Image (spheres, rainbow, N blue to C red):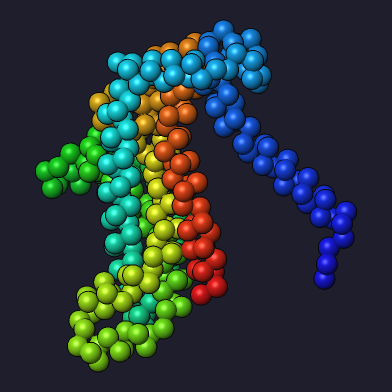
Amino acid sequence: MKMKRSTLILLLVIAILVAAYTLFPFLLVVINSFKTQSAIVGNPVSFSGATFSQLAANLSAVVNNKNFVFWRAFGYSALVTIVSLALLVLFGAMAAWVICRNKAKWSTVIYMIFISSMIIPFQVVMLPLVATFREAGNFVGLAMNGSIPGLIFAYCGFGGAMTVFILTGFIKGVPYELEEAAAIDGCSPEGTFFRIIFPLLKPVITTVTILNGMWIWNDYLLPSILLGQSSPNKTLPVAVQAFVGSFVKSWDLILTAALLAMLPMIIVFLIAQKQIMSGMVEGAIK
């Protein structure tokens, strides 16, 4: 049934308003990164005073500022994000494959535990998490709190549920006959997974990687709790917050620092948006 023209126009107007409402804060950050402090205070929503030379000056002041330590924070964020994503994809795909192909009751129970954990807000478990990490670190002789490996381990735990959920839905659509044929040809279960199943997961792995990557890169609460505000091992969101505390009135530097923290994920999303959409659609169809 075709929609009326008036209905389509109304939906278009609503979509434009929602998009404008969502993008407005980001546009404010971008516009004011091109301005001086006085121009921002004078009119923060105007393009007046925005120049590329001022943006270059702001970028130089932020990157070279001793209180921000941009490159160190960028390196820690990149390390945490890349290692967490690699572990999430590898072990998430393994878990999803075993859950799908094993028809025992325990596999269903484990899958339901993964699904149930997705509805628990992080704020409910953050204090027990810190206490558990402290006790676990004391038990194994490692500093889980305040360390990058501890943060990566936490991200693997919190991101595992969604990763397994998405990958399980995709693997259910992969014909089991492919695995049977590989077994007949003498392929081991490990070889079947890495040579047959894992390459077929490329579209949905791209989707999972981008979704988890944006969450891990932009996350502030978990690094601030596990690493601490005073730790030199800060990720970019925590470093930006500490930078804001040092320059409360320097909005040109604050907004430029926020733009630098957002820019990597925006670029990645723009480059990989086709793969993200195709992965979602293909996973939904399967």
Residue 110 appearing in the image: no
Residue at image point 51% right, 63% down: 278
Q: Left or right: where does residue 93 sit relative to residue 248? A: left
Is 126 displayed left or right of 1 in the figure? Answer: left
The image shows residue 106 at horizontal and vertical percentages of 34, 76
Q: Position of residue 202 (x, y in %)?
A: 39, 65
Q: Is residue 195 above or below residue 45?
A: below
At a point 33% along the width and 70% down the height, the residue shown is: 199
- Horizontal and vertical percent position of residue 276: 49, 57
| Outermost bottom residue | 184
Using the image as rendered, state which of residue 1 and residue 95 is in the foreground.
1
Query: In this orientation, does residue 6 appear?
Result: yes
Where residue 263 appears, as percent x and y from the top left, is: 45, 35
Q: Nearer the viewer, residue 65 or 125?
A: 65
Does residue 132 sit above or below 74 in this rendering?
A: below
At a point 78% along the width and 45% down the height, the residue shown is 13
